[in-house]
Amino acid sequence: MANPIGRIQAMNAEIVSIDAAITQARAELDMLAHIDDDAQRDAAVSERYEDRADAKRSARDLARIRKYISSLTSNQQRLIRRRDHEVARLAAG
């Protein structure tokens, strides 16, 4: 069985890593939201097939990154619960 403090430290490192990935994904989400906004406007006023296709692609990109952020957040919360449980077990002796 691994050392409890080592497990807690490993979980903390993974939580920090996930937090960095969430921050990066949110920055990408902001950029994609601006691109999607422009694409949706272009598609609304244009009759060009390419504009509609771009709007669909950008909407899919937004959905993909939102799903990714949600997944990262869920994983991070799960790790935090596990870490807190390990800390409580360690504190209880």
Image (cartoon, helix red, strand yellow):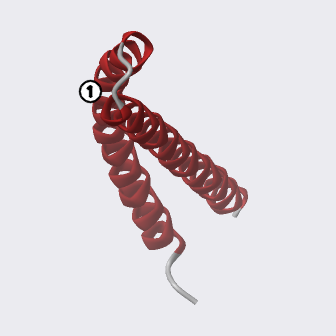
Q: Is residue 15 left or right of residue 42?
A: right
Residue 13, located in which quarter of the rendered image? bottom left
Frontmost residue, 4 versus 23: 23
Q: Is residue 79 left or right of residue 31?
A: right
Pointer 1 residue: 31
Q: Is residue 90 above or below residue 68?
A: below
Q: Position of residue 28 (x, y in %)?
A: 29, 35
Q: Is residue 44 above or below residue 19?
A: above
Secondary structure beneath label 1: helix
Frontmost residue, 36 versus 73: 36
Q: Position of residue 89 (x, y in %)?
A: 70, 61
Q: Residue furthest bottom?
A: 1
- Say which residue appears at 52% left-offset and 39% top-offset: 63
Q: Position of residue 59 (x, y in %)?
A: 47, 34
Q: Residue furthest front?
A: 47
- Say which residue appears at 33% left-offset and 27% top-offset: 48
Q: Is residue 69 left or right of residue 43?
A: right
Frontmost residue, 27 versus 5: 27
Number of marks in the image?
1
